[in-house]
Image (tube, rainbow, N blue to C red):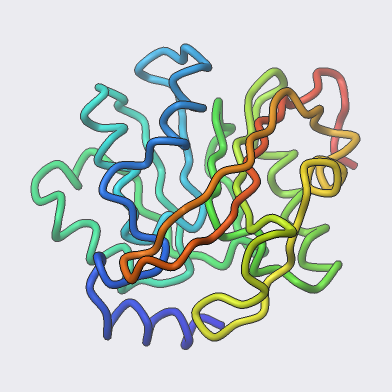
Amino acid sequence: MKEHWEKLFSSKSTTELSWYQPYPVVSMSFIESLDLPLDAAIIDVGGGDSLLVDALLEKGFTNIYVLDISAAALENAKSRLGVRALGVHWIVSDITEFIPPVQFDCWHDRAAFHFLTDPAQVQKYTRIAAGAVKPGGQLIIGTFSEEGPIRCSGLEIRQYNAGSLCSCFQPFFSCDTSLQVNHYTPSGAEQNFIFCSLSREKGDDIK
């Protein structure tokens, strides 16, 4: 899996990738609705060279983490940001092997979770997220919906609806809101996503 993503990010520019957005409107709308302090710990899981980190920096956030399995993806983002990259925590890791260095106020994932097609991988991810997000913190996650693609970047994915996506994170998270939205790739293809915002339950310990 790592080799696949290293090759992809080394061979294509940011604007050629299917998930490219000039500005992450939906993700930023969810994050802004949380009214987080500017020093809130925010992680973008599978962030790659997404422009979400740029948007967060422009809003004044000072404690941003970007995780991706591909070192090449993060190097692309660092190169784009220049000196501003020094103010970001960059983490190269498979999300199912991630050891969180801190607890996060907000965990964001747009289009990484749906690549986990093995139930064991899904369970690892959800338990890592449950341990990494502060009680009362938020998890914002976007995947392909049941009306979206069945493959992406040459790999199979798992489709979700709001109910099935939220159920993956129970009992540690409760679903607050969901939104189904179309994304248009640089080539003009339409991809339907489901986004859910979930709250980390207080008092549910990870065992």
Front position in the image: 14 or 89:
14
Q: Quadrant of the C terminus?
A: top right
Front position in the image: 79 or 29:
29
| Residue visible at 26% across and 66% down in the picture | 14
Q: Quadrant of the N terminus?
A: bottom right
| Residue visible at 81% across and 73% down in the picture | 118
Residue furthest to the left in view is 83
**Which percent across, then down, holds residue 119?**
86, 67
Left-right relation of 137 to 92: right
Front position in the image: 140 or 131:
140
**Which percent across, then down, holds residue 32?**
44, 20
| Residue visible at 37% across and 66% down in the picture | 188
User: Image height check: is 79 above or below 154?
Assistant: above
Residue 7 sits in which quadrant?
A: bottom left
Left-right relation of 140 to 158: left
* Number of dots carrying numbers: 0
User: Image height check: is 88 above or below 5?
Assistant: above
Front position in the image: 75 or 108:
108
| Residue visible at 24% across and 65% down in the picture | 15
Left-right relation of 190 to 160: left
Residue 147 sits in which quadrant?
A: bottom right
**Which percent across, then down, holds residue 8?**
37, 82
User: Image height check: is 191 above or below 171?
Assistant: below
Left-right relation of 163 to 151: right
